[in-house]
């Protein structure tokens, strides 16, 4: 019986693996390098375009010229911001 217990326990202990080292999520360079960005440049910009197009159509249907001008400027400004951020993201991924 003792030999059987040792045999079974040795087999059970060999199959138990120590837990993997867990690192808490932090926005450090190493963590950011491990994370791949899931959205493509085209998808982000098309989502922005769709959102502003819907708002612009609503302003157009109500003939609100001031709102249409505001939306046009805001769209172009945010498109520029997104393109800058996407350029930074692309440069970080290449690194």
Image (spheres, grey):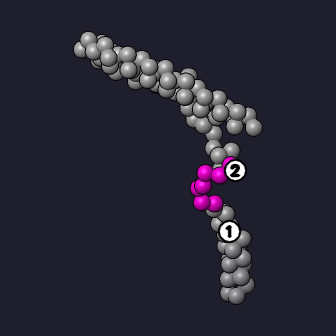
Reply above or below: 1 against 34: below
Q: Which mark is residue 88?
A: none
Identify the residue under disc 1: 18
Residue 4 x/y as whole percent: 69, 81
Residue under the image location 35 percent in, 16 percent down:
68
Residues at discs 2 and 1 in contact (Cβ within 8 Å):
no
Q: Position of residue 65 (x, y in %)?
A: 31, 13
* CA distance for labels 2 and 1: 24 Å
Instruction: Say if 84 sits above or below 24 in the image.
Output: above
**Please, what secondary structure does the residue beneath circle 2 have?**
helix
Q: Residues within 10 Å of mark 1 (few under 14, many from 20)?
A: few
Determine which quarter of the picture holds residue 12.
bottom right
Identify the residue shown where x is 49% and y is 20%.
76
Q: Residue furthest bottom?
A: 2
Q: Is residue 52 found left or right of 12 in the rendered image?
A: left
What secondary structure is the magenta-colored segment mainly? loop
The magenta region covers 23-29
Q: Which residue is mark 2?
A: 30
Quadrant in which the N terminus appears = bottom right
**Residue 70: image location, x then y, percent:** 38, 20
2 or 1: tag closer to the N-terminus: 1
């Amino acid at each position: 019986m003792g030999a059987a217990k040792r045999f079974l326990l040795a087999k059970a202990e060999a199959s138990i693996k120590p837990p993997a080292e867990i690192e808490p999520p932090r926005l450090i360079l190493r963590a950011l390098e491990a994370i791949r960005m899931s959205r493509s440049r085209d998808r982000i910009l098309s989502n922005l375009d769709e959102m502003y197009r819907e708002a612009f159509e609503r302003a157009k249907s109500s003939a609100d010229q001031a709102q249409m001008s505001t939306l046009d400027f805001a769209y172009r400004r945010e498109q520029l911001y997104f393109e800058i951020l996407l350029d930074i993201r692309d440069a970080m991924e290449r690194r």
